[in-house]
Image: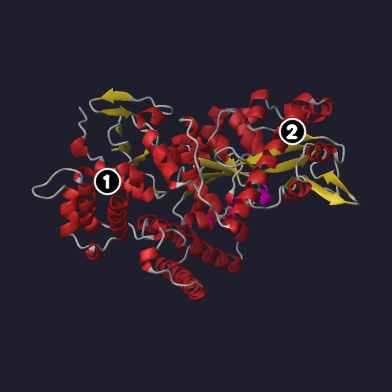
Amino acid sequence: MIAPHSIQEVMNRADIIDVVGQFVRLKKRGANHIANCPFHNEKTPSFYVSAAKGIYKCFGCGKAGNVVTFLQEHEKLTYPESIKWLADYYKIEIEETEKSPEQQQQQLAEESLRIINEYAANYFYDTLLNNEEGQAVGLSYFKQRGFTKATIEKFRLGYCPEGYDTFAKEAIQKGYNPELLEKAGLIKYRNDKYYDVYHGRVIFPIQAMTGRVLGFGARILKKNDKAPKYINSPENELYNKSRVLYGMHQSRQAISKQDECFLVEGYTDVISLHQGGVENVVSSSGTSLTEGQLRLIAQLTKNLTILYDGDAAGVNAALRGLDLALEQSFNVQLVLLPEGHDPDSFIQEKGAAEFHNYVKEHKKDVIGFRLEVGLIEAGGDPVKKSKLVNEIAETISRINKAEDFALQDYYIKRASDALDVDHAGMVNLVNKNIREKLEQDRRHKERQQAAEEVTPQEYLPVEELPRPKDDDEQEWELVRILLEHGGKAYEHYDNVAALVHERVDPDLIENQMVRMVYDAYFGYQEERGELPAAGFFYSLPDTALQNKLAGLLHTRNEISHN
C-alpha cells in the first residue's frame, strides 16, 4: 500500500486544471474552467472544474470528483494506479507502507510475473519485425490477414521462433527465473530441459485496461491435428481469464465515448474492426461472459451489442452469459452477420460505414432473438415449445424489475403473443422464477454469513458502509459546514469546527459515512493540531465518498453558467 504521507504529498502537488487539461480542452470562465463533458456526449459545455476546490462536476451527467477520480473514470485506472500516475507526472517519489509477509510474497510474485510478461512481449514483438524467421513466417501471416504495421504495433503482436527452446534459452541466459517463466506459461520442463510453449506460433498479448501485459494468446501456423489451434496463458497471480477482455486497453476510450461495446469471439475480429475504424470492441476469447468481465464493461457503458457468426457455435457463444448481463441491467442487443462472414471478414470487405448500417438494421434484443431462434428449432413439437416457454420466462425474470418494470412487462406481453400462451400464465411463470432466484440468493447469503465472523460495525471498511440516503441531508450538511467553514472564527469559539465539536454528539450520527468523515476530521485535528482541508478526504481510496464530497461542495449555486 502507498504510505498516507505520500498520498497526501501527491494530492497537495496535483493541479486539477493541469491534469484534466491533459485530456480535455478547458476554457476559463470566471473562477472556474469549463468544457464539454468527457463522460457523455453534449453540445453545450456543462463540465466545470474548480481550481480552488480541486474538484470537477458535470451538471449534465452528474459525474463529479477530484483529480484522482478523474483519472479513475477517464483513464480507467485503479486508485493506486492513479496515485502512481500523478507521482510520475509530478516527479514525486512515493513510499509504501510495510506489508505482511503474505502481502510481500503476493506483490513480489505479481511484480516478477509483470516483468517477465513485459520482457516476453517485447521479445516476441522484436522477433516478428526484426528476425528473419519472424518476418518470413509471422509477419507474412499478419500481412495476409491485412494487418498494417501500425495495427501490429498497436496490439503488440509477435512471433515465437520454431526452435523448441529458442526463447527459453535467451530468457534464462538473461537471468529470468525458470520457475517464474514456467508459472507465466511461457516455458515447460520436460526430459531434463526447458522448451518453449509457444514455439512456431504468432502471439497476441493480453493486456489489462491500463496496458499492462497479463498473459498471452498464441495461434499455431503449421497444420498439426495433435496441437490446439490456440493456447492461452495459465491462470496465476496476474492473469485471471474471467476478469479480462481482449482489446479493452485499446478500446476503453472509444467504448466510453460511444456508450456502446461490441463483443466478438476472436482476437483477429477485434484487431480487424479496430483497423477498419470500429474501435469500441472487445473479445471474451470464446468463453462465456463472466461477472468480472461484465464489471469491466460496466465501467464504460451499459450498452452491449454481441456480434456472432451464423453457425451453431457462434450462436451458442453469443448466448452464454446473457442472463448475467440482464441481471446487471445491461441493454443487450445481438447481431447475426451474413452467412459466410465473421466480424473480421465483414469489416475488411465492407468497411466501417456499411458495418454500422448493417448493425443498426439487424440488431435484435435478447428476447426477440431467443423467440426467433427457439420457435424455428421447436417447430410443431409441443415438448420443445414448452421448454422454450420456460427458458424465455427464466430470461425475462433476470431483468432487474426494480430498475425496469416497464421493460419486463413489455417482454412478457411480447413473449405471450409470440408463443401463443396466456399472459397471466406467463406472468406467474416469470414471478415463479424470480422467487426461486431470490430464495437461492437468500440461502447463499445465509451460508456466507454463517461461514464468516461478523465484523463490528465501527470497523467496517469504507466500501462496505451504507451509502447516503435522501433523509441524510442534514448530516451531510454538517460535513459541508466543516469542510467549507470549519476554520472560520465564530463568536467566542476558536472556529466553527470547535462549535460543531462541542454541540454535536457523534454517537447520534446515523449515517456511517458521515460518522467516518466526522471522526477522521477531528482525529486529524487532534493528531496534527490543525484542521484538515477537503483534499485530505479526497486522498481516501473510496470513489463513492469522493464523488459525494465533490457534489456536496460543487453546487449550481456556487457556479455561474454565465
From the viewer's side, name the closer residue of 231 and 529: 529
Q: Secondary structure at mark 2?
A: helix
Residue 312 falls within the magenta-colored stretch: yes
| Left or right for 203, reference 386 | right
Tell me the residue at 58%/51% (across/down): 243
Magenta segment, which residues? Answer: 309-322
Residue 270 is tagged as none
Q: Nearer the viewer, residue 1 or 480?
A: 1
User: Which residue corresponds to the image point at 20% horizontal and 56% vertical from the top-left?
Assistant: 501
Q: Position of residue 257 (x, y in %)?
A: 45, 35
Q: Nearer the viewer, residue 517 or 427?
A: 517
Q: Amino acid at mark 1?
A: Glu
Kindly state the secondary structure of the residue where label 1 is placed.
loop
At 35% from the left edge and 50% from the top edge, which residue is drawn?
545
The earlier-in-sequence mark between 2 and 1 is 2
Tag in front: 2 or 1: 1
- Label 2 Cα crowd, 10 Å radius (few <14 / some 14-19 / many 20+): some
Residue 370 falls in which quadrant of the image? bottom right
User: Which residue has dot 2 on it?
Assistant: 123
Give how far across and how far down residue 366 sits, in percent. Answer: 51, 52
Q: Which mark is residue 530?
A: 1
